[in-house]
Amino acid sequence: QKEVEQDPGPLSVPEGAIVSLNCTYSNSAFQYFMWYRQYSRKGPELLMYTYSSGNKEDGRFTAQVDKSSKYISLFIRDSQPSDSATYLCAMKGTNAGKSTFGDGTTLTVKP
Amino acid sequence: KAGVTQTPRYLIKTRGQQVTLSCSPISGHRSVSWYQQTPGQGLQFLFEYFSETQRNKGNFPGRFSGRQFSNSRSEMNVSTLELGDSALYLCASSLVQGFEQYFGPGTRLTVT
């Protein structure tokens, strides 16, 4: 069983929709939680970086962490065609540089 | 500020050959991590370097090695290439070990 499981997708939504992307994990040592966006033929781009449980908002993006359920989510409000990409969740413990990634969810936002 | 740069961007090699990939981190960043990305396995951690020392290592065979120079630039080497080594190799840099990582565009390696 993988340490990080991500909803596989693909996900297709109309422009303006609210998108929910989700990951679960099994390692209780994970303290830092990240969301990356990866466009085709590009490297992942860091979107959100949160520590421990709670919510963090940045523009149209909200990251939510529930450590008691070992569940993290990324919400995208008012989704745009430019949001079409693969979204990767990642997490790590307090001291290790190693990040463990989910397999990614491919999102398509249709105009 | 310039981002993470990786060279070359594309590479085609034959089974049994060896390859060296290069990564220049963001100016001021001292930590460099390497990842392999494939459709079947996703993003998998190879190793991390900080201050010229390997700090963490993933579950890859000894054919995969790396190093970091005093200017924080890093190289990774794969010897005796196998078909399964075909992948996108990504380098990520961070200010200090374990902090927010910023990825380069990757080197796409194809082994024939």
Image (tube, rainbow, N blue to C red):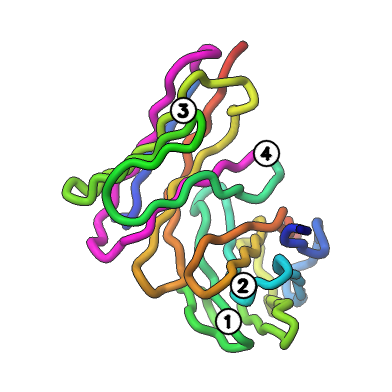
Mark 3 or mark 4: whose residue is earlier in sequence: 4
Q: Secondary structure at mark 4?
A: loop
Distance from Cα at disc 1 to Cα at disc 3 = 34 Å
Q: Which segment is the magenta one? A: A13-39
Mark identifier at residue B50 = 1
Q: From the viewer's perspective, tell me whether residue A34 is left or right of residue B104.
A: left
Amino acid marked by disc 3:
Ile
Which residue sits at x=73%, y=69%? B27
Are marks 2 and 1 in one subunit? yes
Q: Amino acid at mark 2?
A: Val
State which chain disc 3 sits on.
A
Query: Which residue has dot 2 on it?
Result: B32
Q: Are marks 2 and 4 on the same chain?
A: no
Identity of the residue drawn at 72% across and 88% down: B70
Residue appearing at x 65%, y 68% in the figure? B82
If the image is split into quadrants, where does the C terminus of chain A sit? top right
Residue A34: x and y in percent read 44, 51
- Considering only vertical position in the picture, is B48 above or below B69? above
Amino acid at dot 4: Ser
User: Closer to the camera: disc 3 or disc 4?
Assistant: 3
Would you name the residue on which mark 3 appears?
A: A76
Residues tagged 1 and 3 counted as in contact (Cβ below 8 A): no
| Depth order, front residue of A90/B36 | A90
Discs 2, 1 touching: Cβ within 8 Å: yes
**Place of residue A84 in the rendered image (x, y in percent of width and height, measured from the top left):** 59, 28
The chain to which mark 2 is attached is: B
Kindly state the secondary structure of the residue where label 3 is placed: strand
Badge number at residue A40: 4
Tell me if mark 1 has few (under 14), some (14-19) or many (20+) residues whose alpha carbon lies within 10 angstroms of its own. many
